[in-house]
Amino acid sequence: MKELELKYGCNPNQKPSRIYMEEGELPIEVLNGRPGYINFLDAFNSWQLVRELKEATGLPAAASFKHVSPAGAAVAMPLTDTLKKIYFVDDIKIPLSPIATAYARARGADRMSSYGDFIALSDTCDEAVATLIKREVSDGVIAPDYTPEALAILKEKRKGTYNVIKMDPNYRPNPIERKQVFGITFEQNRNEINLADDALFDNIPTQNKDFTPEAKRDLKIALITLKYTQSNSVCYVKDGQAIGIGAGQQSRIHCTRLAGNKADIWWLRQCPKVLNLPFKPGIRRADRDNTIDVYISEDHDDVLREGTWQQFFTERPEVFTMEEKKAWIAQNTGVCLGSDAFFPFGDNIERAHKSGVQFIAQAGGSVRDDNVIETCDKYNIAMAFIGIRLFHH
């Protein structure tokens, strides 16, 4: 197949629309559904991300994409009972395969942003992954292959219209890439920078120069995730998964705050006070996600006021006070932070420290590098200047 006609482009008024190859054939097979223009943008960007994560770590990888940026990305790591609970996979009857744990982590990190996502899997989609996908609101999935059991499950989703794409894992694109904007063609070499090499951590200007093997793995995950995230972008990673991604912000500090707030929410969801919220039986998963998000926020009265809490809970929960939240967040440690370009000021480090960041990888090269290094030293943070910018547009 050399080309595929699409229903429409980014918006319904943008017709006609297609994807096509100038040379050779499309490296995909649509096994179910009718993916659209944005679906394919998400599919191809997320596929590159999980393929590179797998190559860098040797572990199965998964990503959850929304509007051409990852809402979550992760490699296969065992799930604690707490993570199983906050990711809503504690009731799955069949064993979770490695690729299933990667997907549970990628989807579960920021469930609000992942609602209606496009999924990428580095490895064959098996029954366990398909079982998790079936119960979530999602637009589609791309993977190198599907077991018959998984494909049968996915074909039942969305009344048979769920988008299932099989990707040729051996496909490698032309090293020159082009796109048009306003009738003008842009051309550049593809960004094939290698982010799997430990040499990334050779230049360490901070007093603390101790990068654990786990920190190096997580920083590579952060940087590879940023490589496929709309810039400006910042990514917090812990235990093999992104826990907060700030994408597409004009200011670096706003990226750091946005991603840090998401990382804090991920951590707060693991607090016993949140884990034990008395939800009414049968509450929809999306409603539960939204309710938790509001309960954790400063707008908690929106779900706790009289006449409202009865819609969600069997009894009115106590307020999760600011003091309690700060005390819980202070227990989060060992977090890694990557940035797609240099930090211009130490305020980014101040914000990162509040979310438990102890390891940083960033380009370096700001006129205020001395201020950034000094702030890292104040908190005994180990930081590497990798000398690489990872803008993605």
Image (cartoon, rainbow, N blue to C red):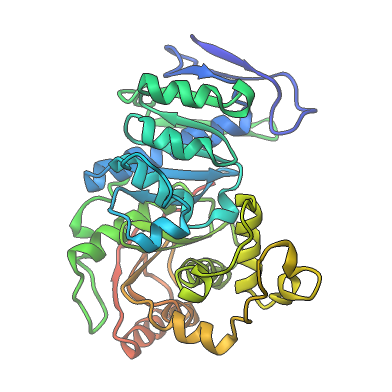
In depth, the one of 24 and 334 nearer the eye is 334
Say above or below: 348 vs 21: below
In depth, the one of 21 and 308 nearer the eye is 308
Instruction: Give percent across and percent down for residue 140.
Output: 54, 32
| Residue plotted at (43% across, 48% down) | 91
Quarter-wise, where is residue 211 in the image? bottom left
Could you tell me if residue 340 is visible in this image?
A: no
Say above or below: 103 vs 245: above
| Residue plotted at (45% across, 70% down) | 267
Could you tell me if residue 139 is visible in this image?
A: yes
Instruction: Give percent across and percent down for residue 362.
Output: 37, 66
In depth, the one of 35 and 131 nearer the eye is 131
| Number of dots carrying numbers | 0
Instruction: Give percent across and percent down for residue 101.
Output: 34, 47
Say above or below: 173 vs 225: above
Q: Tell me: 343 left or right of 261.
A: left
Q: Tell me: 119 left or right of 331.
A: right
| Residue plotted at (65% across, 63% down) | 291
Instruction: Give percent across and percent down for residue 323.
Output: 54, 90
